[in-house]
Image (spheres, rainbow, N blue to C red):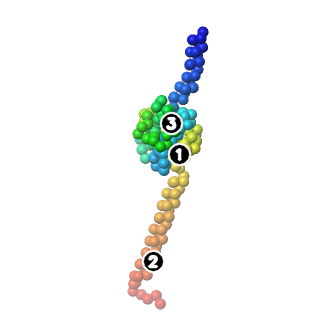
Amino acid sequence: MRVFVLTIAAVWLTIPLSAFAAGPRLIMIHGAPLTKPVIMDNWQENIDLIHATANDAGISLKELANRTFVEVELFSGPYWVEYAEADNVRDTLQPESADQRARFYPAVQGRPAVMAYEAGLPRQVDAKGLAILQRHGIPVSLDSRQSSVATLGILVAVSLLIVFAGWRINKRLKEVDYGFDPR
């Protein structure tokens, strides 16, 4: 009976630990438009982010070719558990040491935000995942503001070109001698 109770206790105690071991202990997100790497070290939040990418995005990697992205490095396993507990995470964590890599593509022009892991199909990031990324300063949408700024810049440039062309034409007309005196 004593062995049975100890076995049950051991199994019961390892269930929560194995649940935590199912996700990356650390996540590093880096690359333009970020000015410095973001390191996510809340294990439960990291697991929630991974779960937030469970649904197929319904697009191919080829369709992501021209979209803006940030690099995502995932650090999993016992080594990274100890590493995270040592409080030196922000100083020494290197992207090339990651166990898995992905790219996060923010939503743009009506297309959803996508996480593309190095192995597997692109995954759509749900609202919970977007909220997690936003809390860490990761841009989750590049929609209207950037498009509006580009459109405004083009309109200003075209307007200035038209004004300049009109000024040059007016100046030329004044310089040409038409052979008659309007007086």
Q: Which of 32 and 83 is in front in this view?
A: 83
SS of the residue under disc 2: helix
Q: How crowded is mark 3: few (under 14 residues within 10 Å), some or many (20 or more)?
A: few
Mark 3 or mark 2: name the one nearer the start of the chain: 3
Q: Nearer the viewer, residue 3 or 99?
A: 3
Marking on residue 183:
none
User: Residue at horizontal 51%, vertical 54%?
Assistant: 147
As measured in the structure, the alpha-carbon distance from the residue carrying label 2 to the one carrying label 1 is: 51 Å
Q: Going from the N terminus, do you reach mark 3 or mark 1 first?
A: 3
Q: Which mark is residue 170?
A: 2
x then y, percent, for residue 152: 52, 60
> Label 1 amino acid?
Ile
Q: Is residue 160 above or below residue 127?
A: below
- The CA distance from mark 3 to mark 2 is 74 Å
The CA distance from mark 3 to mark 1 is 25 Å
Mark 3 in CB contact with mark 2 (< 8 angstroms): no
- Nearest the viewer among 61 and 27 is 27
Residue 117 image position (x, y, % from top left): 45, 36
Quadrant location, the N terminus: top right
Q: Earlier in the sequence, mark 2 or mark 1?
A: 1
Q: What residue type is labelled 3?
A: Ala
Badge nearest the viewer, 3 or 2: 3
Could you say which disc has been placed on residue 138 in the image?
A: 1
Residue at position x 54%, y 54% in the image: 145
- Mark 2 or 1, closer to the camera: 1
Question: Residue 86, labelled with which disc?
Answer: 3
Where's residue 119, x and y in %? 42, 33
Q: Mark 2 is on which residue type?
A: Asn
